[in-house]
Amino acid sequence: MLEVEDRLARIRAAWMAGRAAADEAPPDWRDVVGRGAGAEAALAALAGQAMQVLLRPLPPPLTPRPLLPVLAVPSPPEAVRPRIRRLLTARHGDAAGVRALVLFLAARGVAMHPADWLPRPTDDWAPSFYAPWQAWAGSEPQTDATEALTAETYQEWPWAARRAALAAMRRGDSAAVRAILAARAAGEPAERRLRLLEILEDGLSAEDVPLLEGFAGDRSDRVQALVRRLLARLGRVSDASLAADAARELAQELAAMVELVRVGLLKRRNQLTFKPLKTAPQEHRRRELLAVVTLAELAAALGVAEAGLVESLPVDRARIIGAFATMVVETASAAAWRALFDLTLQDADAPLELAVTLSRRADAGERAAMLAAVLVRETAIGFEGSLAVAGDRLGAAGGGPLARSAAYRALLELAATTQSQAAGAPPPALATGLATLGLLLDAAAARTVLDDVQAAGLSGADPRLDMLRLNIALARERAT
């Protein structure tokens, strides 16, 4: 074989020099190619065949992979796996739909079967019990569960397990989490630094200020923006943020685009009003300012305390309430956010967009209360607003609020209309609404919806009922 390699090298050298190469071929090749005009062509064919067949490069050495770890959470019962696979197929290409299904199963105490779905190493949203699979997918070493996470053992933990452990520690030992982040977070890539500092949102307090200020000048703009938002919630200003004079100028510019008036006869209170501006560029500028000015800075520019901006629901005549709600969620103090959240919860006329955005900062109990209120107010058959409010708290909503919902009555009417149509594709809103209710409701409420839509005329074998049936089946399996 070495002689053939040497001869092929001589043949290539001869051709590169522009001369015939038959004399450089192995002796038994010369008899085959012969002499004359066709010798070089025959030699080229032989050389090409030799390089393709005889001299194939060796594959890289195989690296043995460990077996897929066993999770602490069981897989779904085999009887329901075909339905899960159908749901995954229907959500193919829809990352949000797959995520909702994964979170629903986690809320019911089961994990996806690995043959149906595996998380990627970058799926930071996946429930914490998937961390061993994420480490396996990223070829990271598995963690010794007996070894505690400290600044010294930090690098020995795979990323997903490391972040999950820090999030769990945050609820019991915030000082230890701050010490680990102070020692190790700066050495992580920008995306991971962002995910680590986001852990501080849970239980944010004044004790976190020194750590946050240490990242105020981070080289990542996204990390800087997060630090500024968290410090604003604590009434602090980042040293790396806009200069004080520039920040005041932006806040005053925004204050000129809103109106703060006193309302109420018996109980006087402030009310913020967003009125339509004269031109589209002015409207665009106001949205830009709402994204960079903090709630406290706007309050100071209007001459009131931060709480003075949330004494009543804002009046939105400019369709900008979502941008204001985002400002409150990201920069308001805990007291100011809670005041606006409570007003939204109690007022049946509060915009749905306001409820959805404010719920991003709510805990599980607050989300449950807001979800019950939003289900009653829901008018969209797809129930997307309710799903956004629920977050990862799926499969637990009762059917009482749903029964009073105009959207649910419209959904049943649509189901009856769809069955009566002789031809034509069924409306996608019906499928979306049924799937969303299957994600949101507890098993008893899901059974009620299933009975209602079948009574309206929908076939019990309709695939649009798969999510409702999965909801019921998992609850049944859990009870046995």
Image (spheres, helix red, strand yellow):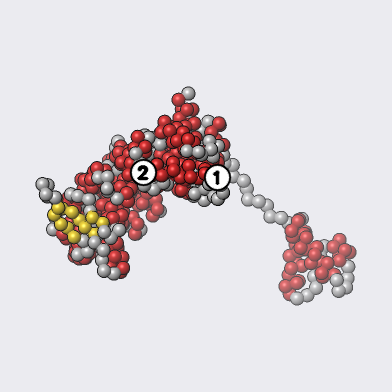
Q: In the image, which disc is placed on residue 258? A: none
**259 vs 79: above or below:** below
Amino acid of disc 2: Ala
Q: Where is residue 257 drawn, in percent x and y?
A: 22, 64
Name the mark nearer the viewer: 1 or 2. Answer: 2
Query: What residue is drawn where x is 55% and y is 50%?
Result: 424
Looking at this view, is 108 or 9 the one in front? 108
- Quick one: label 1 or label 2, which is nearer the N terminus? 1
- SS category of the residue bearing label 2: helix
Q: Look at the image and tell me whether residue 147 can be seen.
A: no
Query: What residue is drawn where x is 53% and y is 31%?
Result: 77
Q: Which residue is mark 1?
A: 89
Query: What residue is drawn where x is 56% and y is 47%?
Result: 422
Amino acid of disc 1: Thr
Q: In the image, which disc is placed on residue 406? A: 2
Q: Quadrant of residue 260?
A: bottom left
